[in-house]
Image (spheres, helix red, strand yellow):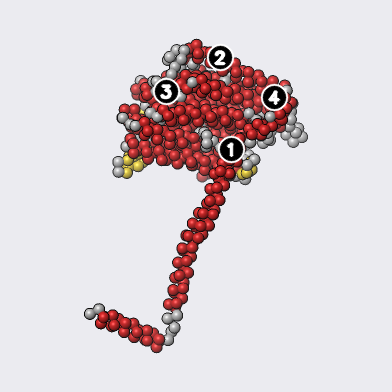
């Protein structure tokens, strides 16, 4: 199956071509949906086969390259179109194809009756094609191909309903915002590829990372490469200061939010940082930057999520916050914990988004949670699965989110210190609070919707079955990464599986701290207690005493408005960056450079030629005597010149 890994990339491409070219003519939604979901489902089965084949190999043989052809061969640069099949790429491929398949199935029900049904599945398949190139590529160029591909697909899918509006304008504007902001990060990534080639004389992962581990390279060089890689990651994975595109991306269909903006694309930056772990390990100052940016992003987004009323916006800021957690782990040198949280987050966040889509579907496109309430009895399956996902993300013991969050918090304390742990813990409490606020306002309490126009109902099985599968994964998914304090040094199966990938980096980071098991258990107990307290408070307020929440929002109206308006960050960017660039472009580039200089030069030259030709045209009088006189004058001048030159 390892040698067939290219089919996991090819099949979604075939699905895209079939639905993209013939989808309009097929007209049968079941056939279109079967083609789209089937392409990803078969890819998932191939990845599963490759996974078990890899597990059966000795550890030193678990990294294999599948070469397809030579893509570029220029001077000393040779880039092969090849796929790297190892522990990290297989883990990501299982997440992308597995969760992607469930979302494709869900979309058959969610997008039923949409005029662009065939186009939607074509775009989804194209996204899977690009994402698989990103995570399987064995060099930075193939990775960059997938990197740009998922950016394009994100643009297409965010603006899928191009004729609709959302709170900040049209969906097309949200798509453009995502595309432009991502280009900033992508520019950093493009620059770093040149720097990597100049430093290591290669763009192949194995060659670059082997040289990074063994060659005497200056820390400043590692730092420069690492910082530009991280700039690329901040764009794709929505970190400060480039996180502003992700909340607006919720203008797209909900399955898009689940697939691209929760489970797969936004984790591309985390994957890239983890893949280049040996480079980051050589730049400890940049690793600290990664950790600090991740931590600040986590708490900033969590605080904004406390008061949001759009069900998808709450989940969007939750996603930004959880991505911050992943970068916090990577910055602390806990790369396995970072990818572990990528996996568990894919399960429960995809479930939360799909559950939100089920609610929106049942509430006739209403997204304001203040207009929900009491939906538990109308949507029992959606409620149960949403409840499980909410407990998972809140860090309730026994569910997947608890294990991955605890691993990150412990590494933050062991490798970063008490302050990192404290801020991470406060963020976790905020997460538990706003998620159970969301749960309470949606499914509990009195019904606040208009019964004359809205009739809540449970979603069809094609939508709820994927919810149930993801709910099961949200429960059991964390048990492959049990804390070492309970299972011993080699009992954490997930960390043991990825250990060979990060071994070179871990050797460089051997100085990172460690503490006693008692401290780990104590901090774990404290985090659980605080999370449960936040859950209890949220349920008590929003389920039993909603008037108390209203009083608090009135009493602290300034803070409430600040959080509700997202710290006015978009407005600051608009005033400080967007408007100056637009006005500068209009006044300087358009009116001065374009109109005055370029157009002026072209038009001025045309006028000069016109005047000269107008003067010369007068010579053409049509009178033969005049022509003869001019000819004789010309001959006389030539003779005079010849005489004078002797």
Left or right of 527? Residue 284 is: left
| Cα separation between marks 4 and 2 | 26 Å
Q: How many residues crowd around disc 1 within 10 Å: few (fewer than 14), some, or many (20 or more)?
A: few
Residue pictured at 63% horizontal, 26% vertical: 434
Residue 569: assigned label? 1
Nearer the camera: disc 4 or disc 2: 2
Expressed as whole percent of the image width and height from the top left, the position of residue 329 reads: 48, 25
Residue at x 48%, y 42% (from the top left corner): 183
Q: Nearer the viewer, residue 177 or 154?
A: 177
Numbered badge on residue 542: 4
**How far across and down, in percent of the image, does residue 343 sit?**
50, 25
Q: Earlier in the sequence, mark 3 or mark 4?
A: 3
Q: CA distance from mark 2 to mark 3?
A: 27 Å
Q: Is residue 355 visible?
A: yes
Are there few (<14), some (14-19), or many (20+) residues within 10 Å of tag 2? few
The quarter of the rendered structure image containing the C terminus is: bottom left
| Front: mark 1 or 2 | 1
Give the residue drawn at x 36%, y 36%: 196
Q: Which residue is mark 2?
A: 525
Q: Secondary structure at mark 2?
A: helix
Q: Earlier in the sequence, mark 4 or mark 2?
A: 2
Residue under label 3, please give it: 498
Query: Which of marks 3 and 1 precedes in the sequence?
Result: 3
Q: Considering depth in this image, is 150 or 230 the residue closer to the camera?
A: 230
Task: Name the image quarter holding residue 554.
Answer: top right
Of marks 2 and 3, the one in the foreground:
2
Judged from the image, the secondary structure of the residue bearing numbered disc 3 is helix
Residue contact between numbered discs 2 and 3, judged by CB atoms under 8 Å = no
Query: Along the horizontal axis of the image, is 455 left or right of 132?
Result: right
């Amino acid at each position: 199956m390892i040698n067939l890994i290219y089919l996991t990339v090819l099949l979604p491409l075939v699905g895209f071509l079939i639905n993209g070219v013939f989808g309009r003519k097929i007209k049968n939604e079941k056939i279109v949906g079967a083609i789209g979901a089937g392409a990803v489902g078969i890819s998932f089965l191939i990845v599963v086969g490759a996974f078990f084949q890899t597990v059966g190999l000795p550890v030193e043989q678990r990294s294999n390259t599948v070469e397809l052809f030579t893509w570029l061969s220029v001077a000393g640069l040779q880039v092969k179109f090849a796929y790297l099949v190892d522990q990290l790429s297989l883990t990501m491929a299982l997440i992308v194809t597995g969760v992607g398949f469930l979302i494709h199935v869900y979309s058959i029900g969610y997008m039923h009756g949409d005029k662009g049904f065939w186009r939607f599945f074509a775009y989804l398949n194209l996204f899977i094609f690009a994402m698989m190139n990103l995570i399987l590529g064995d060099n930075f160029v193939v990775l960059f191909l997938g990197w740009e591909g998922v950016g394009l697909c994100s643009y297409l899918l965010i603006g899928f309903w191009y004729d609709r509006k959302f709170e900040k304008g049209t969906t097309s504007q949200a798509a453009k915002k995502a595309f432009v902001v991502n280009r900033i990060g992508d520019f950093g990534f493009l620059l770093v590829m040149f720097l990597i080639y100049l430093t290591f004389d290669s763009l192949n992962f194995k060659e670059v990372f082997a040289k990074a581990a063994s060659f005497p390279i200056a820390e400043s060089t590692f730092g420069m490469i690492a910082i530009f890689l991280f700039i690329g990651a901040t764009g794709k994975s929505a970190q400060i200061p480039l996180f502003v595109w992700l909340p607006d991306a919720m203008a797209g269909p909900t399955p898009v939010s689940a697939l691209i903006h929760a489970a797969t694309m936004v984790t591309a930056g985390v994957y890239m940082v983890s893949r280049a772990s040996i480079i980051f390990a050589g730049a400890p100052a940049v690793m600290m930057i990664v950790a600090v940016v991740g931590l600040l992003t986590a708490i900033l987004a969590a605080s904004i999520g406390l008061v949001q009323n759009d069900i998808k916006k709450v989940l969007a800021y939750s996603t930004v916050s959880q991505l911050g957690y992943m970068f916090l782990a990577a910055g602390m040198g806990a790369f396995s914990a970072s990818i572990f949280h990528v996996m568990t987050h894919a399960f429960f966040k995809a479930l939360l988004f799909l559950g939100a889509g089920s609610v929106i579907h049942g509430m006739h496109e209403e997204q304001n949670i203040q207009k929900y309430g009491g939906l538990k009895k109308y949507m029992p399956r959606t409620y149960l699965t949403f409840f499980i996902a909410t407990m998972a993300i809140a860090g309730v013991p026994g569910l997947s989110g608890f294990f991955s969050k605890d691993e990150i918090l412990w590494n933050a304390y062991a490798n970063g210190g008490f302050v990192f742990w404290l801020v991470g813990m406060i963020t976790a409490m905020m997460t538990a609070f706003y998620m159970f606020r969301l749960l309470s306002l949606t499914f509990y309490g009195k019904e606040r919707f208009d019964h004359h126009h809205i009739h809540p109902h449970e979603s069809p099985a094609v939508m709820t079955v994927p919810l149930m599968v993801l709910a099961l994964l949200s429960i059991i998914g964390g048990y492959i990464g049990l804390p070492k304090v309970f299972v011993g040094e080699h009992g954490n199966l997930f960390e043991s599986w990825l250990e060979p990938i990060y071994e070179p980096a871990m050797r460089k980071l051997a100085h990172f701290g460690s503490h006693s098991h008692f401290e780990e258990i104590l901090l774990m107990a404290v985090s659980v207690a605080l999370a449960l307290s936040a859950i209890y408070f949220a349920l008590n307020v929003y389920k039993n005493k909603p008037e108390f929440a209203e009083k608090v929002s009135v009493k602290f109206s300034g803070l409430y408005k600040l959080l509700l308006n997202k710290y006015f960050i978009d407005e600051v960017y608009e005033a400080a960056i967007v408007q100056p660039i637009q006005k500068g472009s209009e006044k300087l580039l358009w009116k001065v450079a374009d109109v005055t200089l370029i157009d002026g030069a072209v038009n001025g030259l045309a006028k000069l030629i016109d005047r000269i030709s107008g003067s010369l045209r007068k010579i053409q009088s049509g009178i033969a005597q005049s022509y003869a006189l001019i000819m004789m004058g010309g001959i006389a001048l030539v003779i005079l010149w010849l005489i004078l030159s002797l």
